[in-house]
Amino acid sequence: MSKVVLITGGSSGIGKSIGEFLHHKGFTVFGTSRNPSNYKNSIFPLLELDVKQVSTITAAVQTVIDSKGRLDVLINNAGAGITGPIEEIPEEEIKANFDTNFFGPINVIKAVLPQMRGQKSGLIINVTSIAGYMGLPYRGIYSASKGALEILTEAFRMELKPFDIEMTNVAPGDFATNIAAGRYHAPLKEDSPYNASYGKSLELMNAHVDAGSDPEMMAKAVYNIINTNKPKIHYKVGEFMQKFSIVLKRVLPDRVYEKLLMNHYKI
């Protein structure tokens, strides 16, 4: 019997790539989108779900269970980017980003747990980010939201062990997706004290995404995780230097690592 998989944010980018890969491997895949009617050519069903609206989460999860009688894998992939000087990002945008990247995944997890506990099995994969392992200039809110999800997973997976439910993180680096187009960008103000350095950093961030890896790399990593009996707590997927940056943070003095980041972002 093929495993039943639910992927939030499955209409484009990494989520779509994961869904298509698993579909071709014989999994029963359901994706989600805030507006599934906009994606007529999806090769797997797309359910309406907005991670900021609990009622849509409950309805989508129930649809999967009613249709297939079980839910084996949740991939918490839906997320949003945000850039800007922390001082200049409106508070409502900061809260909106955490609603999508942190509180949203929590609510999806809560919705699937009763079914997984009842069937005495399940796997939850939280898609975080390599950016969540470090505070990146002008991406501080994004780093914080993804870092919070990383830490939450460490605690959550221990609480779920008695129910034979596994949880893990997979942190991607830069991939060639449309995430940059969907980011909230704090305006680049002419009179801002951050104008020059934020402008340079913004160009660099967009270039990284444009030159990013093929999202199929993430799809293959997720497939391997699903087929692992005892998943690790953390996985990192991306180019060597992106993953190596996490190692450097562990071994270098804080100020040396900070200087490396500032040089990289031309601050």
Image (spheres, rainbow, N blue to C red):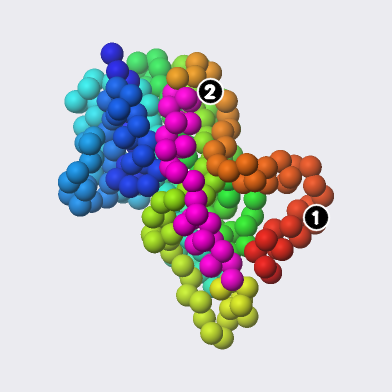
CB of mark 1 within 8 Å of CB of mark 2? no
| Span colored in magenta | 200-226
Answer few, some or many: residues within 10 Å of disc 1's Cα (few below 14, many 20 plus, some between 14 and 19): few
| Coordinates of residue 190 in the picture (x, y in percent) | 54, 85
Residue at (36, 39) in percent of width and height: 17
Secondary structure beneath disc 1? helix
Disc 1: which residue: 256
Q: State left or right for residue 197 relative to residue 180.
A: right
Q: Label 1 to label 2, Cα distance in Å?
A: 33 Å
| Coordinates of residue 81 in the picture (x, y in percent) | 46, 56
Q: Is residue 33 visible?
A: yes
Q: Identify the image quadrant of the N terminus.
A: top left
Main secondary structure type of the part rendered in magenta? helix
Query: Residue 185, labelled with which disc?
Result: none
Q: Is residue 25 above or below residue 191?
A: above
Q: Earlier in the sequence, mark 1 or mark 2?
A: 2
Disc 2: which residue: 231
Confirm whether the magenta stretch covers residue 85. no
Asked where in the image residue 116 lies, by quadrant, the reply is: top left
Residue at (44, 23) in percent of width and height: 226
